[in-house]
Amino acid sequence: MNLDLNSQRGPKRSAQLVLWVGLLLGAAIPRIIGAFLLPNEEGDPYAYAQAVAMMRTAIVDGTFTIGELFGFWLPLYQFICALISAVVGHPLYVAKLFSAFCGAVMCLLVFSLSLRLTGDRIIAFIAFLLIALNPIHVMYSAFSMSDVPHALLVMCSLYFAINNRWVVAASFAAAGGLMRPESWLFIALLPVLQWALHRRVSVMAFLLTVSAPLLWIYISWAATGNALEYFDVRRDYIRELLAADPGLADLSLTHVLANLKTLMYSTGPAVLIACTIAVWLLVKRICREGNNRASELTPVIITAAYFFSSLGFLLLAYFTKNQPSIFARYCLVLFALGLPVAAWTTFASRMWKPAWALSLSALVIALCLWQFTVQLRDGAAFVRSVSQKRIVANYLKERFESVSNLKVFCDDDTIKTLTGIPADRFVGTSSSPRDSKSFLESLKERRVEYIVYELRNGSPAVSLFRDLGEERLNDMFQLVASTNMELRLYRTSF
């Protein structure tokens, strides 16, 4: 009889292995392809990649100190990528591929958590597909940024909290707290959940979550001599950002709705609606059945708590202007946390009247299709934008091969990276005077041969071209490559 049981377990385990490998490949392949073929989004991803490269250099040279960890962003993502690239090289691709790997594993956790909450493999598989094929999630998983790796750590924390392993859950929350400050909310959330559900609090779990900000304060002190330097830098950044663009401080209805639209766009209207319904269903069942059967709902309660606490933290940061804008990437963790709750709501609706259950299913399907269509459109627009930047980058790359002392004015990090030209051959807005006359003189003094013109707020090139007028502009600058009116490459004639 034991032999029969063992013979049955073998095929079962093989089928499970095939399932998980298939899911992993299905999630990983588009993200890995994106990591190799898509350059980073303009802005923060290149700053992260630069931080990784600097840490890697210090590690390889043997000069690394704890002060190297200090910067504008918390250091764990950059440090992990620096360690890997110290062995294999290619810090930019390591940072992108590490993010892609984290995005793929997160898709598996969405499947696992959805299966745990519903017991329905079909619903869990649909939840997996919604995140595995989500255009925005795929795209940001291919960028060298901490958002997706941080979201994975939050999902891991949730997984172990559901399984009543609070110390392990706190360990992942602490790791998340060394990657992004959003995870500091778990210092309060985990003890509250543990007490509410089990009438006890793990001291070890609490100390682990607290260790993340304490360690960061120590790193700040070791690097700068000021334990609160990070908070000062962050405060100054927000102040300068709001001074440069006062509209960001505007809490008018139009501005607020625009940011809430971004939240809806990335988190998904279906997820937000389903999670709201889930809270109503949970309250209703707990009030009706009491604490005797409430334990059956514990996984759903914990997942919903993770979702709404993360949502609340983001909204609090926005409305207090500690985060002037809500970006789509900030909501990726909400999308991942909300999908298992949405799966549970869909499963629970089977107990409703058929008409109500059918209406909810139709609404969820329609909203998911809308979200996918809109994000796919925006993803295609990003790919088109990249192809236009490649035209400019390829022209400069070919020119640099014959003129090694080439100098270019360019503010676009994507174009700089695509050219392969050394960073010291570029000048930008940060190192240039702002008034048109002084800017023009600086271009001549530095012998800048090419200008990448983009419609950017605060760019001295935009002001110069406007002040010169069309006739003088054509005399001093020759248009050599143009993809659209907002992205052009000029060669200087002086």
Image (cartoon, helix red, strand yellow):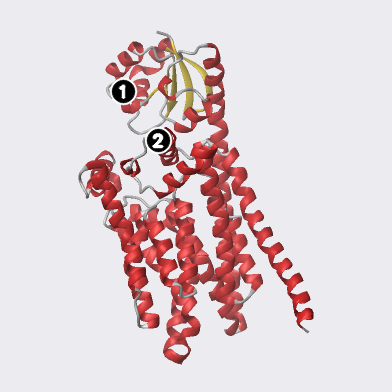
Residue wearing tag 1 = 432
Callout 2: SS: loop
Residue 142 drawn at (x, y percent): 54, 45
Q: Spatial distance from mark 1 to mark 2, Cα to Cα? A: 35 Å
Of all residues, the one furthest to the top in this rendering is: 494
Nearest the camera: 100 or 273? 100
Q: Looking at the picture, does residue 423 appear above or below residue 383?
A: above
**Whether residue 222 can be seen here:** yes
* Residue type, mark 2 in image: Gly
Check whether the beta carbons of the residues at disc 1 and disc 2 lie within 8 A of each other.
no
> How packed is label 1: few (under 14 Cα within 10 Å), some, or many (20 or more)?
some
Q: Is residue 132 left or right of residue 413?
A: right
- Residue 163 screen position, x and y as percent: 49, 74
Of 50 and 290, nearer the camera is 50
Quarter of the image with the C terminus is top left
Residue drawn where x is 44% and y is 31% of the image: 412
Q: Left or right? Give the position of 166 relative to 136.
A: left
Disc 1 versus disc 2: nearer the observer: 2
Q: On the image, numbered disc 2 is attached to which residue?
A: 62
Instruction: Give the residue at x 35% y 63%.
Output: 209
Q: Is residue 184 above or below residue 250?
A: below
Measured from the top left, where is residue 92 in percent x and y? 50, 37
Q: Residue furthest left?
A: 226
Three-letter amino acid code at the position of disc 1 = Ser
Quadrant of the drawing holding the N terminus: bottom right
Kindly tell me whether residue 144 is visible in this rendering. Answer: no
Residue 122, above or below 172: below
Q: Please give the name of the residue rendered at 24% of the width and 49% of the height, measured from the top-left corner.
A: 231
Q: Earlier in the sequence, mark 1 or mark 2?
A: 2
